[in-house]
Image: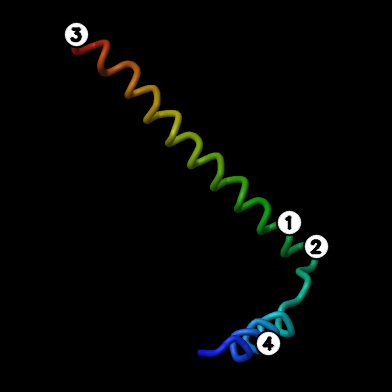
Amino acid sequence: MDLQAKIREYINVLKMARKPDREEFIETAKISIAVMFVVGFIGFVVYVLMEIVPQMVR
């Protein structure tokens, strides 16, 4: 695939893109924040387990 075809493809994608309305944006933001909290909580649990379990084994 040559460069011009790739640029044309990107331009077509940008033409189809639209600005989300307020409701759609808020819903997407809520989902993103919820996922960040879940991933952060899982990371925190793993961190705590990695700190506590080795001390309990000693």
Q: Is residue 29 above or below residue 36?
A: below
At 60% across and 53% down in the image, what residue appears? 31
Q: Mark 2 points at which residue?
A: 22
Question: Looking at the image, which residue sits at the far left?
Answer: 58
Q: Which amino acid does label 3 sit on?
A: Arg
- Quarter of the image that includes the C terminus: top left
Question: Which numbered disc, 4 or 1, marks the residue closer to the eye?
Answer: 4
Q: In this view, does 2 lie above or below 17?
A: below
Label 4 with label 3: CB-CB less than 8 Å: no
Q: Mark 3 or mark 2: which comes first in sequence? A: 2
Q: Mark 4 or mark 2: which comes first in sequence? A: 4
Residue 54 lies left or right of residue 48; in this view the side is left
Q: Mark 4 or mark 1: which comes first in sequence? A: 4
Q: Name the residue under label 1.
A: 26
Label 1 with label 2: CB-CB less than 8 Å: yes
Element carrying mark 1 = helix
Between marks 4 and 3, how big is the CA–CA gap? 61 Å
Q: Which amino acid does label 1 sit on?
A: Ile
Between marks 3 and 2, how big is the CA–CA gap? 55 Å
Element carrying mark 2 = helix
At 62% across and 46% down in the image, what residue appears? 33
Element carrying mark 4 = helix
Closest to the observer, 9 or 33: 9
Residue 34 lies left or right of residue 20; in this view the side is left
Q: Residue 58 carries which label?
A: 3
Closest to the observer, 50 or 6: 6
Label 4 with label 2: CB-CB less than 8 Å: no
Question: Which numbered disc, 3 or 2, marks the residue closer to the eye?
Answer: 3
Q: Residue 12 carries which label?
A: 4
Q: Mark 4 or mark 3: which comes first in sequence? A: 4
Q: Which amino acid does label 4 sit on?
A: Asn
Element carrying mark 3 = loop
